[in-house]
Image (spheres, rainbow, N blue to C red):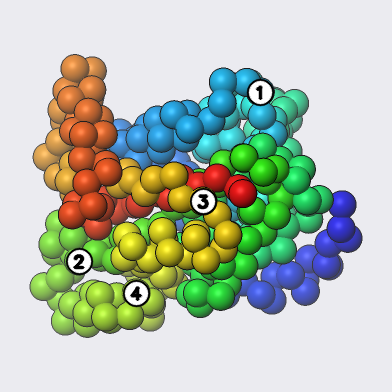
Amino acid sequence: MADAAPYHVRMSEVPWEIVEHYDATEEDARIRHGFAQLELLRTQEIIRRFLPPRPLTILDVGGATGVHAAWLADDGHHVQIFDVVERHVEAAAKLTASSPTVTAEWGDGRHLPCPDDSADAALLLGPLYHLIEREDRLLALREAARVVRPGGRVFAATISRFASLFDGLDQGFLFDDEGARMIDEDLATGQHRNPTGDPRWFTTAYFHRPGEVRQECMDAGLEVLTVVGVEGLAGWLGHLAERWEVPSDREAIMRAAAITEGEESLLGLSAHVVAVTAVR
């Protein structure tokens, strides 16, 4: 394993506002409960569909406190969590203490401290959100391709270019001058900035058009198997929260998202879009 750079040097590469955002919010806890579980359960469904049915070594890059590592470990996999937020790594240590098949350490997806061909799969369910420059995103994708064995899977999640527009309609900040200006900038450039620091408006991020993530994966040398929408329209319909608590209704909501997941004309409607790829 390559020697890692000192922590204070590595931290300088991570924009302060991103670390500050995740220090102030409980992002993992958000998707563990209530209607927000739609994102978690659909992501599980997609990943399980494309992983072979045997114990694997999986890198969870940007894995935060281990929300995905926990269920992957329960499925019998060995999971290595890497994250750039120190508080996340410390919290993930609680999971590693109770699960011998999970490890957690500081790690930047652009420079993973892992040997070539050392994993069976990699999850990038967050790093591409916060890499504003295309070259940095390609670097992260190439790193995943480097450390995953040929034939292994790389799952790359992105936020839809239209997410802030739909969220603005739902939450009402489309009708606020500052909110509307921010949404216009997101739509025009994909580069999301939140100068207000309001946690409802997220933090520095890049919002992809669906075709972009496919092209970036291809340009990184990965074979794209499919690109799917995670939540579909349901993710924006807050009134479904009550129905989510009814098992049969929850199943119907999940089924609706699955039915439309591969429809290209609807991909940007999902808040999150996942590219499922294979290492050549």
Q: Which residue is mark 2?
A: 165
Q: CA distance from mark 2 to mark 3?
A: 31 Å
When the figure is inspected, residue 121 is found, relative to residue 201, above or below; the finding is: above
Single out the mark in the foreground, 3 or 1: 3
Single out the mark in the foreground, 2 or 3: 3
**For the point 18% across and 60% down, which residue is it?**
166
When the figure is inspected, residue 244 is found, relative to residue 153, above or below; the finding is: above
Q: Is residue 136 left or right of residue 117?
A: left
Q: Which residue is mark 4?
A: 190
Is disc 4 in contact with disc 3, using a CB cutoff of under 8 Å?
Answer: no
> What amino acid does circle 4 point to?
Gly
Mark 2 Cα-neighbour bin, 10 Å: few <14, some 14–19, many ≥20: many
> What amino acid does circle 1 point to?
Pro
Q: Earlier in the sequence, mark 4 or mark 1?
A: 1
> What amino acid does circle 3 point to?
Glu
In what element is the residue under mark 2? Answer: helix
Q: Which residue is mark 3?
A: 223
Tell me residue 149's x, y (percent).
70, 43
Mark 1 Cα-neighbour bin, 10 Å: few <14, some 14–19, many ≥20: some
Tell me residue 140's x, y (percent).
60, 62
Q: CA distance from mark 3 to mark 1?
A: 23 Å
Q: CA distance from mark 4 to mark 2?
A: 12 Å
**For the point 52% across and 66% down, which residue is it?**
219
Q: Which residue is mark 1?
A: 55
